[in-house]
Image (cartoon, grey):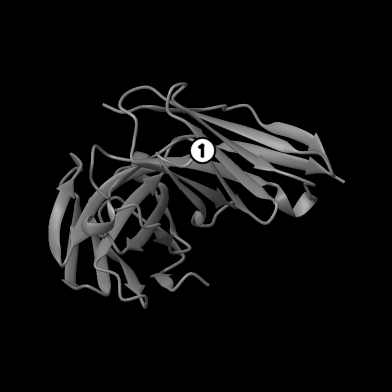
Amino acid sequence: SQKIEQNSEALNIQEGKTATLTCNYTNYSPAYLQWYRQDPGRGPVFLLLIRENEKEKRKERLKVTFDTTLKQSLFHITASQPADSATYLCALPMDSSYKLIFGSGTRLLVRP
Amino acid sequence: ETGVTQTPRHLVMGMTNKKSLKCEQHLGHNAMYWYKQSAKKPLELMFVYNFKEQTENNSVPSRFSPECPNSSHLFLHLHTLQPEDSALYLCASSQPDPLAGGGYEQYFGPGTRLTVT
């Protein structure tokens, strides 16, 4: 079965720097991959979806890459702000269905 | 707001109680989900309904019983829970589109923080 690996250690960076979070998967290459943001005690919020035939996707200060050879997605936040502090989750579809498997997330802390 | 509401937001119940969690989505989606989120663990998919039909029951104990009376409402009935069932229970909805290869994002409610004493 598909497994997702996200760094369990928090990423601590200075405001204004670029944050880079990693999502690795172990099995089949999915048709797409999604990134979510979750604040404490709240539900995840969808940020970006990238399909297997897309190398890169951007939305404002966010950028996602998808490397099916490395079985990896990178999530970048440029010009980071303290308000970007949250946990970021990677999600992949189960097999070929619409149901998702979520990673355990990486917590990002942006210092002012 | 995401268009998905959950009530109650917090619930404390004893092991012999019966309670229900409610979820409502105002997005016109066809699929609805229940997830369990425990501390430092990934989201665990519990149940999935697509067009009101249950399509996933992820080996969830029978003390959790889902109900989907229509495509906008989802319930999770709880009875004789254990302390290890304490967690954040999240409801989500999506619009799966097999013609587009799926991939539609999920919209989550704020969750119900459940404590079993």
Query: Residue most toward the right?
Result: A112
Above or below, comparing residue A89 to residue B111 in the picture: above
The image position of residue A51, as x and y in percent, is 41, 44
* Residue in front for this viewpoint, A85 or B67: A85
Residue B81: in sight, yes or no?
A: no
Q: Is residue A49 above or below residue B32?
A: above
- Give residue A63's position: percent from left, percent from top: 62, 45
The answer to whether residue A30 is left or right of residue B31 is right
Q: Quadrant of residue A100?
A: top left
The picture quadrant where one finds residue A18 is top right
Front residue (pair A93, A43): A93
Tally of numbered tags: 1
Badge 1, how many Cα within 10 Å: few under 14, some, many 20+?
A: few
**Residue A11 left/right relative to A94:** right
User: Which residue is tagged 1?
Assistant: A55
Horizontally, is B100 left or right of B56 in the view? right
The residue positioned farthest toward the left in the image shown? B53
Question: Residue B95, position in %: x, y?
Answer: 30, 64
Q: Secondary structure at mark 1?
A: loop
The answer for which chain carries disc 1 is: A
Q: Residue at x 20, y 42 (%)?
A: B58
Residue drawn at point x = 43 percent, y = 22 percent: A69
Residue A112, position as x, y percentages in the image:
87, 46
Q: Residue A110: in sight, yes or no? A: yes
